[in-house]
Amino acid sequence: MHIGKNRAQLEATGFACHSDLHTDVCVSNRPVRIDTLTMKVYAPFSQEMPQANCVVLPYPKKEDKRLMRSVSSVQILQGNPPPPCRYTHDVPAVVFSSGGYSGNAFHDFSELIIPLFLTSRLFQSRLRFIVPDFRVKFIGKYKNFFSHLSSYEIINPAANVSVHCFPGVVVGLHYHGALALNTNNVPEGYSMLDFKQFLRESYNLKIQDVSQAEKPVLVLISRQGSRMFLNEDEMVTMMKALGFRVVVARLDMMANLDKVAEELNSCSVLVGAHGAGLTNGLFLPQGAVMVQVVGLGLGPFSAFFFGEPSKEMPLNYLEYKIEAEESSLTSLYGRDHPVVVDPESVAATKGYGFEKAVYIDGQNFTINVVRFRETIIKAFGLLGRPSPLG
């Protein structure tokens, strides 16, 4: 069980905890008893260390105090008389919460799916998940992922109230960053390529490199509510004229992860406005192109959340930066308003709440198709194919 700098303590005492800005993770490599009614973990007491009780919120976002109020705690007790076992398991447990921001693809992968892969993969499917704040929709959406990480049914504490005994336990998950694997805290040298290979195995995907694809396919993420493409039909017409088979990924398709994975595995170019849908770039074959449409005021968010991570996947990455005339904010505020001409100063003075309401939640796009066409031609070139213009 990997726990970074605390490995020596774990080996000496059978129990150790790691704490940082984002998360608390505790590990026992000796037998524990878990009461799923109270979510108390009775860990072994060792003479080599003082008796210590602690509480872990097993979702890696502890710096977000408001969010963490909705995450159920796990209490770890050492040295107390434990209750008798009702069920005895011969594989260790991994305890994490599926509360928090689960349900948003970006948060799902950054805070749960990638950390779970890194925590669990070394057990080679011989572990059992216990999931407080069990969200049926989240577990169902990622059923293929979970079935390839564990050969055992997931335990929902609310539906399985009893005392379970395990030969060891990991409580909590390490956070590695936005769609990232932090190389300073990754067991066995795993990389983003290893994670993508695991996704291909989990979803039975055949294409590893974009050179294996036949006719170039472009997937356009169609958003609703905010950061919408108001002239989507014009965009699709232009893309088809350049030689792409165009798939418009609407909400119903994006909700079906099996369908998304299959479609994106044969995709050469993924186009989308800044948002959680671009997370599905993880299913793109290596060498594919991600084109992120960057709205007014969204430059720093776009680069941090998707631009930098795409390099590790590894994908070719392009940005199309919206001009004032393409943003709905111009008609709303006027061409010379600070919201339009100086988003950085507006964000600095008004704060994140205003920034989110205006630039993230309150902006749509009417794309200049002639200008955007140049970006799509560049994407075509990055695929190593002849120019569609001859």
Image (cartoon, grey):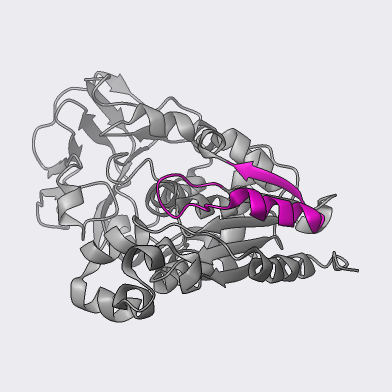
In the image: residue 238, left or right of residue 337 = right
Where's residue 75, x and y in %?
A: 14, 42
Query: Residue 371's x, y, as percent?
Result: 65, 71
Q: Residue at x 82, y 58 (%)?
A: 211
Q: Is residue 308 above or below residue 278?
A: below
Q: In the drawing, does residue 363 fall left or right of residue 156?
A: right
Quarter holding residue 70 = top left
Of residues 229 and 260, the one drawn nearer to the viewer in this rendering: 229
Between 171 and 230, the one nearer to me in the picture: 230
Give above or below for 4 relative to 224.
below
Label tally? 0
Mark yes or no: residue 20 visible.
no
Q: Residue furthest right?
A: 390
Picture residue at 45% right of the left edge, 52% below the top = 276
194 or 294, nearer to the observer: 294
Residue 97: image location, x then y, percent? 29, 40
- Which residue lies at the image location 58% right of the left edge and 54% below the top edge? 281
Report if residue 239 lies within the magenta region: yes
Which segment did they paint magenta?
Answer: 222-249
Picture quarter containing residue 386?
A: bottom right
Front one among 334 and 110 = 334
Task: Answer with left or right where residue 49 lies relative to residue 176.
Answer: left
Q: Is residue 111 magenta?
A: no
Where is residue 142? Give x, y as percent.
48, 35
